[in-house]
Image (spheres, rainbow, N blue to C red):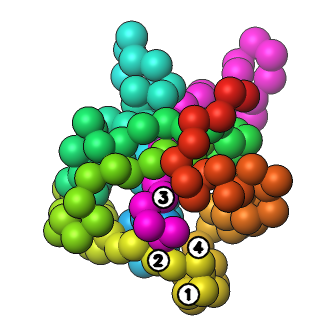
Amino acid sequence: MTYYTKSNPTPRFNTSGGIVLCNKKLLFIYKRGIWDLPKGKIELNDTIESTAVREISEETGLKESDLTVISKLPKTKYYKTVHGEAILKKNYWFIINYTGNPLKKLVPDQNEGITECKWVDFENLDSILANTHARISYLIDYILNNPDFENYLNGSVLNN
């Protein structure tokens, strides 16, 4: 087991993704047996916003031009074990509005272990939240209880 100190810091892994909204539904991906939100690694010279849009497009098949960042969400952090090594994973999150065809077929990125993508209305969130990470439940709860929630649903870009 490796112990991390100031002179031997924990390796870090930063990702960016989002809660995608369309017609009062949220977009989820099913990855390795659990419901999740689309996200991915921040590449060199990418912004966290452009990474979120790119990764959502890559993981679901939605066109980048149909995805608009409307608000920041709180970051989440957790440790992930990769090849026996503890990695601190920091996730940047956004609320993103999808303006394309809501009937467009979603295409899961099977190379990333994603087997399903689907739009879920707010009345049917319980089954998703029963099989997701605590950090995803936290983010969903955060937006549902946010005073700007109606603005999110309308796709209004918020300054924050």
Residue at (40%, 73%) from the top-left corner?
A: 119
Task: Inspect the magenta stretch and tell me whether residue 103 lies in it.
Answer: no
Residue at (74%, 34%) from the top-left corner?
A: 3
Confirm whether residue 106 shows in the render.
no
Compared to 147, does 141 lie above or below? below
Residue at (73%, 65%) from the top-left corner?
A: 144
Cα–Cα span, label 1 and label 2: 6 Å
Closer to the eye: label 4 or 3:
3
* Residue named by callout 4: 132
How many C-alpha atoms fall within 10 Å of the one at disc 3: few (<14), some, or many (≥20)?
A: many
How many C-alpha atoms fall within 10 Å of the one at disc 1: few (<14), some, or many (≥20)?
A: few
Cα–Cα span, label 4 and label 3: 18 Å
The picture places residue 153, in percent across and down from the top left corner, at 57, 58
Count of marks overlaid on the render: 4
Cα–Cα span, label 4 and label 2: 14 Å
Find the magenta span and give its range. Answer: 1-25
Q: Which label belongs to residue 149?
A: none
* Residue named by callout 3: 21
Check whether the beta carbons of the residues at disc 1 and disc 2 lie within 8 A of each other.
yes
The picture places residue 91, in percent across and down from the top left corner, at 60, 40
Query: Quick check: 1 left or right of 64?
Result: right
Q: Which label belongs to residue 120?
A: 2
Check whether the beta carbons of the residues at disc 4 and disc 2 lie within 8 A of each other.
no
* Residue named by callout 1: 124
Which is nearer the eye, 123 or 82? 123
Identify the element where label 1 is drawn.
helix
